[in-house]
Amino acid sequence: MAGEDAAPDAPTRRDYLKYGGAVLGGALLAGCTGSSTDDESGATTDAATSTPEATATEATATETTETDTSYSVSMAPVGEVTFESVPDSWVAYDGGYADMGVALGVGDGMTGIGSADRYYTYVYDELPGVSVDREKLEANQLSDADMSKEAFYELNNDVHLMDPKMLVNWFGWEPQDVDEITEQVAPFVGNLVFRREDEWHDYRYYTLYEAFEKVARVFQETERYEAFESLHDEFIADIQSRLPPADERPNVLLVYAGSDEPEKFSPYRLNDKGTSKKQWRDLGVSDALAGTGVEGLSTTDRGKIDYETMLEIDPDVILLRAHERKSATEFRDTVLEFMRSHPVASELTAVQNGRVYRGGYLYQGPIQNLFLTERGAQQLFPEEFGDVTSDTQLFDRQRVADIVAGDV
């Protein structure tokens, strides 16, 4: 195997994929292709930066589109990427983008993933005909190769669904490494959207469905996307119409601790609008950490809280991440049972009332979000939506499976 810094003599994809925008060179260090603003609804808008090179690229893309089947997709931080044909093979860094591909009916083309452990595919077991090849994904985890360039060469995909600035800021890549893989293998399309608290992410964010729409354009599956969007909007509207008044909803503390006997916790903030907290925002709960000065987990802030800090806050509900391989009953019999026997944790109102639950995935896509929203509604409002341990279903599994299969 060649060294990481040595580019194998693999054929370039330049004959098949053209790209524009601001990935190349120092742009990854400089920021994004444009600025962004947030309106009061939380929607983001781009202010594109026009350059002679960008104008030339756009002209080329427009001219090519008139004579063949090429098309372009634009997403920060990369900018515009032009595809000469629909990608057949692809890899995602996280389970959220992987789930998007499955939702769009192109799951068979997924060759690998950043880490299979954080891609929760058991939800597909409830969807007739929907599945992924976990054996293949577990055999082709980019994390096993420390996200090295060689792994990207070996998988030889048509597109990489991940934020390249994540590779620079988390895994020690240089901007020229991103350029190399883009030139020699395939382009990157993706934006790290699961949280919004990293200082290096100084370019536009996207909501879950904004990112999903971009991926749908990559695979030319806008009809499936629109069907999912309609199903999602109807589902959320129905849930929200049945919620109790705001002043009767619980406040929530969302934390991370992987142990069955947790003592220290990494806090999350619900107000950062990351996609990993989408279900809690849609369910209208308040953040128990609001006004406390406690910041959320980020690349630079790895602070933790303990039971004494929790007791000062005394939230109505505690949501604990990193236990997604457990059922609701298994979680109660291990983590909650430990907290009930702990001298300080046992004083928490949430523990005394049995209101400690699994907190959902760090990375979630559109299919997973439906399941997590259903579960969250049952955790927080069992009187209205049924207990989380029950078989009550709040959305149509068959309809989801039909969309994945192409019946839109």
Image: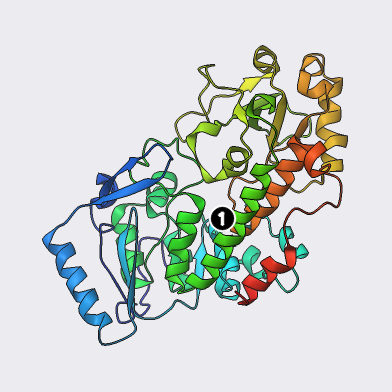
x and y percent of residue 371 in the render? 70, 53
- Asked whether residue 205 is in view, the answer is yes
Q: Is residue 167 above or below residue 106?
A: above
- Asked whether residue 323 is in view, the answer is no
Q: Is residue 231 above or below residue 337?
A: below
Front-lying residue, 241 or 368 = 241
Point 69% across, 21% down: residue: 315
Secondary structure of residue under mark 1? helix
x and y percent of residue 387 in the render? 84, 42
Q: In the image, is 34 to the left or to the right of 310?
A: left
x and y percent of residue 79 in the render? 30, 59
The residue sitting at the bottom extreme is: 67
Q: How is the image coloured?
A: rainbow
Front-lying residue, 134 or 130 = 130
Per the image, the residue denoted by label 1 is 96
x and y percent of residue 222 in the render? 48, 70
Point 55% across, 60% down: residue: 229
Front-lying residue, 337 or 117 = 337
Q: In the image, is 52 to the left or to the right of 322?
A: left
Dividing the picture into quadrants, the one containing residue 35 is: top left
Front-lying residue, 140 or 242 = 242
Point 44% across, 31% down: residue: 300
Q: Is residue 94 above or below residue 354?
A: below
Point 47% across, 49% down: residue: 207
Q: In the image, is 18 to the left or to the right of 3?
A: left
Dividing the picture into quadrants, the one containing residue 328 is: top right
Give the amino acid at mark 1: Gly
- Quarter occupied by the C terminus: bottom right
Q: Is residue 241 above or below residue 95?
A: above
Number of numbered markers? 1
Q: Residues within 10 Å of mark 1 (few under 14, many from 20)?
A: many
The residue sitting at the left extreme is: 52
